[in-house]
Image (cartoon, grey):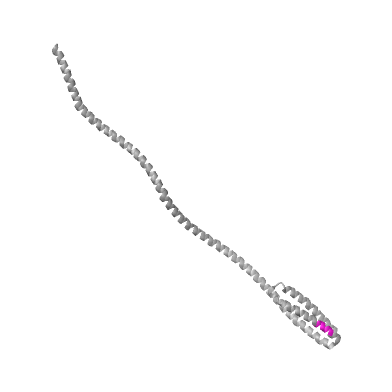
Amino acid sequence: MYNLIQLKSIYLSVSLSIYLFASIRSCDSFPSSSLPSPLLILSFFFLFLLYLLSISRFLSNTKSYLSMTVKSVYLNEVISIYIYLSTYLCITVKNYLVTVKYLFIYLSVCLSIYLSNYLSVCLSIYLSVYLSIYLIIYLSIYLSVYLSICLSIYLSVCLSIYLSNYLSVCLSIYLSICLSIYLIIYLSVYLSIYLSICLSIYLIIYLSVYLSIYLSVYLSI
């Protein structure tokens, strides 16, 4: 009977130590769930100390060994429940952290996609509006200045050239017409006066001379 209880205590102690080691290794990778690890280590050493005490008591007193073995078995069961709960807590925290991690990654990706689309659309709208306003203002100012200066210069040059050509042609035509009219009038008046007066005087003088000569010759004969 005593050997059976001793074997059971040894079996529970070894299995508990293995389970404690596995639980400590599983919880060490999570900072939020690393709090039970010192308690588990203390429980393991306390259980091992109790086991050594039970062996020493067995050598001295069988009755004390039995009570210590019962206490050891009781502590094994309590610590097993504690380890189970702590391991379950570690697994729950681990799953929660993994879920939060993937949820954070998903939300960050969705937020980045949304912000990229939003910024691209808003930036395109802003640039289009800004460029349209800028082009309207720039073109209005540029065209007003360009048309006011360049068109005035162009019109003045073209008008001067046109007027110079027009005036030269028109003046030449005008002068030619005026000169021709003047010459016609002048010649007509001059010839009329000359023919009416000078020719009559010339004929009178010529006829008088001719008649005088003719009469003198005729009378001399």
**Residue 161 relative to residue 125: left or right:** left
Look at 82% across and 84% down and name the residue there: 54
Please tell me in which quadrant of the rendered image residue 73 appears: bottom right
Magenta stretch encompasses residue 53: yes
Q: Position of residue 38 (x, y in %)?
A: 73, 77
> Is residue 127 placed above or below 196 in the rendered structure?
below
User: Residue 75: percent from the left, percent from the top?
Assistant: 77, 83
Furthest residue toward right: 59
Residue 198 visible, this angle: yes
Q: In which quarter of the view is residue 100 placed?
A: bottom right
Q: Is residue 219 left or right of residue 172?
A: left
Q: Position of residue 208 (x, y in %)?
A: 16, 20
The residues colored magenta run 50-56
Image quadrant in which the N terminus is located: bottom right
Residue 83 appearing in the image: no
Does 123 lie within the magenta span? no
Say left or right for 161 vs 194: right
Name the residue: 75% across, 78% down. 41
Q: Position of residue 26 (x, y in %)?
A: 73, 73
* As drawn, 179 above or below 124: above
